[in-house]
Amino acid sequence: VLIKFELKKGLHIPNDLQTKIESEESYYKAYNKTLNYLSYSLRSEKQIKDYLVKNDFAHYSERLIQQLKDLKLIDDLVYAQSYVRTQANVNLKGPRNIERELKEKGVPEQDIWTALDEYSYEQQLQNAVELSDKQWKKTSKHSTIESINKVKKYLLNKGYSFELIDEIITN
């Protein structure tokens, strides 16, 4: 702000310039606070907008978001791809749950579908088998039919499709 407005010690500042300086200073506070928020993890554009509203910086959101996009610090497709990889590899979630969570985070549907294309059927099958094995061990005291139903319900809750679940159960 000092450099932008060429401020020096002892310089007389008219009221209209002072207003501009204060506005610019406030913008840079919002920018720095948002950079700090982004430093912890990737965020979607909607998450940034919500953060700005929550911190009373909503009036800077368009300018700030455009600046962050220009710097490639906000990209919903990159965010969605990273989110899908993490949820698939770490939490073993199914594509339906991942899709729902990304929608809640405000990611555009096209970006969601592009990111989910990276979650191959083979990986979904592998993850679902791993989850079903764990669940099967927990339900071993129950009857076979009851165990099958519990495993199916568990996999459905994790976001896997009926077709994939049936394939696992029949094998």
Image: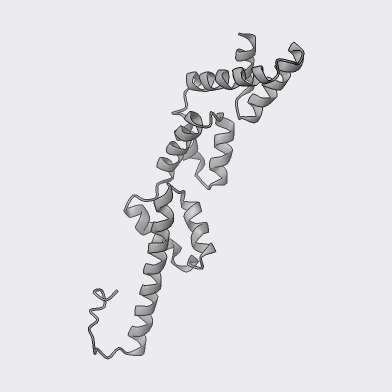
**Which image quarter is the N terminus in?**
bottom left
> Considering only vertical position in the picture, is 141 above or below 50?
above
Left or right of 24, for residue 90: right
Note whether residue 65 is visible.
no
Note whether residue 55 is visible.
yes
Left or right of 18, for residue 44: right
Count the numbered circles shown. Answer: 0
Q: Residue 46 location in percent, x, y?
A: 50, 52
Left or right of 145, for residue 77: left
**Which image quarter is the C terminus in?**
top right
For image coordinates 41% across by 53% down, the residue present is 38
For image coordinates 44% across by 56% down, the residue present is 37
Left or right of 42, for residue 127: right
Q: Residue 94 location in percent, x, y?
A: 56, 29
> Considering only vertical position in the picture, is 48 above or below 142?
below
For image coordinates 40% across by 46% down, the residue present is 75
Q: In terms of image quadrants, where is residue 65? A: bottom left
For image coordinates 24% across by 90% down, the residue present is 10
Q: In terms of image quadrants, where is residue 7? A: bottom left
Q: Residue 53 location in percent, x, y?
A: 52, 63
> Considering only vertical position in the picture, is 25 above or below 71?
below
